[in-house]
Image (cartoon, rainbow, N blue to C red):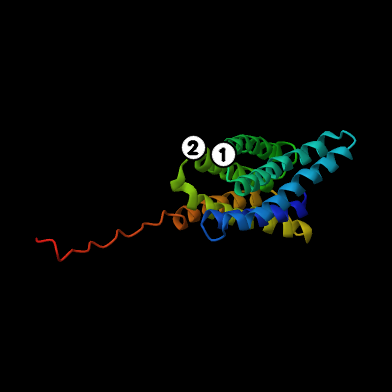
């Protein structure tokens, strides 16, 4: 994934995370989803058309569509009021593909850090499936926090490192990334605990004898 595209993936995940934890209204998040979704569909199409059929280039660009269609799907649901089941089941498909892309990062590209990043995205999109596809609404806030944090740690930070020529990968970095991913999931589980609403106080009607 290109560093510029990755930066904006981080941005849209950050916004969508805020939407899931009820900080940003859905309609306010639609524009970013349209912008990044369109970018993640148009750019890989151009890359593939100019690749000359190079399998490595086509493979590298192909994964971008998974994200592009996700964000366009999110925008569609927001703007039309459509239910989320279709997006949820599409997210299950994305999660499965992300596992494959993660494995390929280890086996073909020798990039453990991005292998872990792809696995982290697989977990996130599986959570989207649980929330939207299966209606596990109790996981919404936890998924929102995980979305927000992954936007920073698997989107913005790696993109900025790539853009500044500071990115490094290897076994040690991969282990650190895996531990960080587990920590972020744990933090999300704590921060995203369902908010318990206090029961309304019982008011005694003085007209009713006790």
Name the mark on residue 134. Answer: 2
101 to the left or right of 59: left
Cα separation, mark 1 vs mark 2, equals 8 Å
Q: Which label number is shown at residue 157?
A: none
For residue 187, say whether it is visible.
yes
Q: Residue furthest front?
A: 207
Instruction: Please give the residue where the numbered disc 1 appears in the rendered image.
Output: 88
Looking at the image, the residue that sits furthest to the bottom is: 206
Measuring 52% from the left and 51% from the top, which residue is drawn there? 185
As drawn, 40 above or below 202: above
The residue closer to the viewer here, 135 or 200, is 200
49 is higher (above) or lower (below) than 141: above
Element carrying mark 2: loop
Q: Are marks 1 and 2 in contact (CB under 8 Å)?
A: yes
Q: Image point 65% across, 39% down: which residue?
A: 98
Image coordinates for residue 170, horizontal then vertical, percent = 69, 48
Q: Is 52 situated left or right of 148 in this image?
A: right
Residue 116 lies, with reference to residue 19, above or below; the image says above
Asked which quadrant contains residue 18, the reply is: bottom right
Q: Quadrant of the C terminus?
A: bottom left
**Taking the image as drawn, is residue 115 in sight?**
no
Q: Earlier in the sequence, mark 1 or mark 2?
A: 1
Most foreground residue, 176 or 6:
6
Residue under the image location 63 percent in, 53 percent down: 13
Instruction: Count numbered badges in the picture.
Output: 2
Q: Identify which residue is drawn at 49% across, 49% down.
A: 140
Classify 10 Å Cα crowding around label 1: few (below 14), some (14-19), many (20 and above). Answer: many
x, y (%) of residue 136? 46, 42
Residue 142 x, y percent position in the rendering? 49, 51
In the image, residue 83 lies at what x, y percent?
55, 41
Q: Residues within 10 Å of mark 2 (few under 14, many from 20)?
A: some
> Secondary structure beneath disc 1?
helix
């Amino acid at each position: 994934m290109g560093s510029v595209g990755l930066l904006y993936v981080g941005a849209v995940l950050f916004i969508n995370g805020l939407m899931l934890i009820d900080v940003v209204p859905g309609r306010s998040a639609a524009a970013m989803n349209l912008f990044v979704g369109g970018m993640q569909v148009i750019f890989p199409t151009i890359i593939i058309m100019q690749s000359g059929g190079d399998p490595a280039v086509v493979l590298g660009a192909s994964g971008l569509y998974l994200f592009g269609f996700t964000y366009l799907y999110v925008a569609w649901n927001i703007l039309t009021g459509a239910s989320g089941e279709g997006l949820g089941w599409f997210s299950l498909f994305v999660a499965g593909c992300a596992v494959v892309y993660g494995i390929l990062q280890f086996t073909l590209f020798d990039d453990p850090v991005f292998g872990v990043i792809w696995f982290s995205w697989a977990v996130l999109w599986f959570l989207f499936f649980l929330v939207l596809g299966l209606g596990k609404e109790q996981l919404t806030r936890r998924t929102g926090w995980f979305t927000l944090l992954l936007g920073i740690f698997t989107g913005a930070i790696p993109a900025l490192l790539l853009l500044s020529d500071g990115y490094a990968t290897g076994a040690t970095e991969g282990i650190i990334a895996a531990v960080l991913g587990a920590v972020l999931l744990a933090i999300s589980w704590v921060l995203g605990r369902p908010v318990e609403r206090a029961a309304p106080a019982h008011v005694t009607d003085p007209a009713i004898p006790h």
